[in-house]
């Protein structure tokens, strides 16, 4: 049977999960949600939305099917900056009373709705705020086509509540359907079944039959076109970008096949990718059926497509088996990085995957160094109580989590670990997982039958301890060893023109730039640039490393291109290090303020929140000398 043809099975499984284990899977206390799912929990959403670009608001009706435990007289939803116009119960609808609690800066306000006996449906009529943190409204000038506006959402971690009243915790799953009205010239897409072309009415219906948590709710609206890659995969982008995107992501069908061979069937019917405008704040977002991706991966040489491997892998680790709270974030991201590199190894070979592992290990070392050796945030199991969960979304969860699985593979062997993970995704499909529950599952299903392999390996220290335990084995890349020879030659003064760099791929250039001397004269910077063209690199990963070197060495020839980059790219991973580097000197600070003043409108609120804090932007009004 074709592994994509699982819709009926998925529906059946979802029904079982929702009817049998609804309360069991949501019993974990979540410090980032006001919901009380042990008393009353949502099971299905029927959403009706109108998108208003003039007012920059969504006007909607969220009808929630709910399951009430015993005689609970109320249900609690999460909201933030929403105008709640009225709430009704049932169909036919009857008005009910509701209250909005005290506001918290990042949690928002609890919406408590009074229930009548036997209530199974709650209807919430609402309007979003023009400044809703999950929504970015782009003017035509901020898009590739320059003719029509664009809207996209970013719900992770707890921003879904800024555009839909919901129970906004990753441990609560529901199915959904939606009717969305947009201007006829635009196409809406969701993390659901999607249209592939525009219609004249501007009215579209969506359906998500598999249960998801709220952070995977997603909407994009714009001048969007579709290109088929295979029977069950394709890409969306603005028309001017579509050809480049289709070429860059041509390996997606092969990626899906590789992932299925590793860890079982893809359970979400289709896998499509949309490349958003440059202001998207992340590399990608794993919204089910429709990955949101940054255009910074469109390098023209398919050198950065491992980002797609990563988001695809989330279809198992994260979307299928989900962290129960954001304290368990590593269960989503650490597993996904490991899975991503296994996909890359199948498609591009072990040498390629080894380079990714080494770069990840180096990135982890840098991040650990920035935190400090004993910092609590370097544990895998986080403690984010009283904090915005975005604070925990660091590289620790990604790379330390993946490294733990790599260490386990080294001890038990790849075959046993693959069997364990395949069963883990199957047995726990469409459910949430706490760190403690995973440890128990690991001990029962892998440690107990491989005790000798774990005898000298303290996996709990990895999870509940700081830094990297000494039991971590080294990872070596044979291709990087050759690059290291060229790094040594350059550092000893060898001219760039004599370095052996032919056939290098992006990962080798990244390793080279990270390894050469960082304090260079303007003459040596110019020689590097003239020989290798770093200032005008089409690869964003390489460009950012070069711009950091340019800032540190005051190589002003790269500044105009760096400013253009900061003005057009909103990916937080890239812009934050550049602004941080600029802020180290008074001259750089003035430059950072001037660039940000022009560029801020092009960034998503997720990015501006980080940069505002770094630059203390609230202290600088429009009359600022910067």
Image: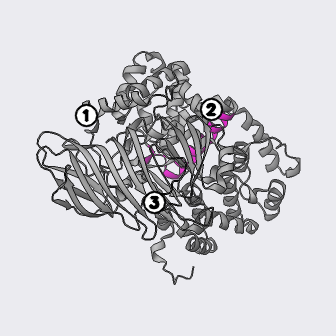
CA gap, disc 1 and disc 3: 39 Å
The residue carrying mark 3 is: 182
Q: Is residue 312 highlighted in magenta?
A: no
CA gap, disc 2 and disc 3: 34 Å
Q: Nearer the viewer, mark 2 or mark 1?
A: 2
Residue at (67, 37) in percent of width and height: 355
The residue carrying mark 2 is: 254
Q: Which mark is residue 24?
A: 1
In the picture, measured across the screen, residue 462 lies left or right of residue 17, that is right
Q: Which mark is residue 123?
A: none
In the rendered image, the vertical position of residue 134 relative to residue 319, given as above or below:
below
Near-viewer residue (247 or 590): 247
Residue at (82, 44) in percent of width and height: 501
In the picture, the quarter occupied by the C terminus is bottom right
Residue at (42, 52) in percent of width and height: 155
Q: Secondary structure at mark 1?
A: helix
In the rendered image, the vertical position of residue 193 relative to residue 571, given as above or below:
above
The boundaries of the magenta stretch are 352-378
Residue 500: percent from left, percent from top: 84, 42
Residue 92: percent from left, percent from top: 19, 51
Q: Nearer the viewer, mark 2 or mark 3?
A: 3
Residue 509 visible to an observer of this rendering: yes
Classed neighbour count for the residue bearing mark 1: other residues with Cα under 10 Å, few (<14), some (14–19), many (≥20): few
In the picture, measured across the screen, residue 448 lies left or right of residue 303, that is left
Near-viewer residue (407 or 6): 6
């Amino acid at each position: 049977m074709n592994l994509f043809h699982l819709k009926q099975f998925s529906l059946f499984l979802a029904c079982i999960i929702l009817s049998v284990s609804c309360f069991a899977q949501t019993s974990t206390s979540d410090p980032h949600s006001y919901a009380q799912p042990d008393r009353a929990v949502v099971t299905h959403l029927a959403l009706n939305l109108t998108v208003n670009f003039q007012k920059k608001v969504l006007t909607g009706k969220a009808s929630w099917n709910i399951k009430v435990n015993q005689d609970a007289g109320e249900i609690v939803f999460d909201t933030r900056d929403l105008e709640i116009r009225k709430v009704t119960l049932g169909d036919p609808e009857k008005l009910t009373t509701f209250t909005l609690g005290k506001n918290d800066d990042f949690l928002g306000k609890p919406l408590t709705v009074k229930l009548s006996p036997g209530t199974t449906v709650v209807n919430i009529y609402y309007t979003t705020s023009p400044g809703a943190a999950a929504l970015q409204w782009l003017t035509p000038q901020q898009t590739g086509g320059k003719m029509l506006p664009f809207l996209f959402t970013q719900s992770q971690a707890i921003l879904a509540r800024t555009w839909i009243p919901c129970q906004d915790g990753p441990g609560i799953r529901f199915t959904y359907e939606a009717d969305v009205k947009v201007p006829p010239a635009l196409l809406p897409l969701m993390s659901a079944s999607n249209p592939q072309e525009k219609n004249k009415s501007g009215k579209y219906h969506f359906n998500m039959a598999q249960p998801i948590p709220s952070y995977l709710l997603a909407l994009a609206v714009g001048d969007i076109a579709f290109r088929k890659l295979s029977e069950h995969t394709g890409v969306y982008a603005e028309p001017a970008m579509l050809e480049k995107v289709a070429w860059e992501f041509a390996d997606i069908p092969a990626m899906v096949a590789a992932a299925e061979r590793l860890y079982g069937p893809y359970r979400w019917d289709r896998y499509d990718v949309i490349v958003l405008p440059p202001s998207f704040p992340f590399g990608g977002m794993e919204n089910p059926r429709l990955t949101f991706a940054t255009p910074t991966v469109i390098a023209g040489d398919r050198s950065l497509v491992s980002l797609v491997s990563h988001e695809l892998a989330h279809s198992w680790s994260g979307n299928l088996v989900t962290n129960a709270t954001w304290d368990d974030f590593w269960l989503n991201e650490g597993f996904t990085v490991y899975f991503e590199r296994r996909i890359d190894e199948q498609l591009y070979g072990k040498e390629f995957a080894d380079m990714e592992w080494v770069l990840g290990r180096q990135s982890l070392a840098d991040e650990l160094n920035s935190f400090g050796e004993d910092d609590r945030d370097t544990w895998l199991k986080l403690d984010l109580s009283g904090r915005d969960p975005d604070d925990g979304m660091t590289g620790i969860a990604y790379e330390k989590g993946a490294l733990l699985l790599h260490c386990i593979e080294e001890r038990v062997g790849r075959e046993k670990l693959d069997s364990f993970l395949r069963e883990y995704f199957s047995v726990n499909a469409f459910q949430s997982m706490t760190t403690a529950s995973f440890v128990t599952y690991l001990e029962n299903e892998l440690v107990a039958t491989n005790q000798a392999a774990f005898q000298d390996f303290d996996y709990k220290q990895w999870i509940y301890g700081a830094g990297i335990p000494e039991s971590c084995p080294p990872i070596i890349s044979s291709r990087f060893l050759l690059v290291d020879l060229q790094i040594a030659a350059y550092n000893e003064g060898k001219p760039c023109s004599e370095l052996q760099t032919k056939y290098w791929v992006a990962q080798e250039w990244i390793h080279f730039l990270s390894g050469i001397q960082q304090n260079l004269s303007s003459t040596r910077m110019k020689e590097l640039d003239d020989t290798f063209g770093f200032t005008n690199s089409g690869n964003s990963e390489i460009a950012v490393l070069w711009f950091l070197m340019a800032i540190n060495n005051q190589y002003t020839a790269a500044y105009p291109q760096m400013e253009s980059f900061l003005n057009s790219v909103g990916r937080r991973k890239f812009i934050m290090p550049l602004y941080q580097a600029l802020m180290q000197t008074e001259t750089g600070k003035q430059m950072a303020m001037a660039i940000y003043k022009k560029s801020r409108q092009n960034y998503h609120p997720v990015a501006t929140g980080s940069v505002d804090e770094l630059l203390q932007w609230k202290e600088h009004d429009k009359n600022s000398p910067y």
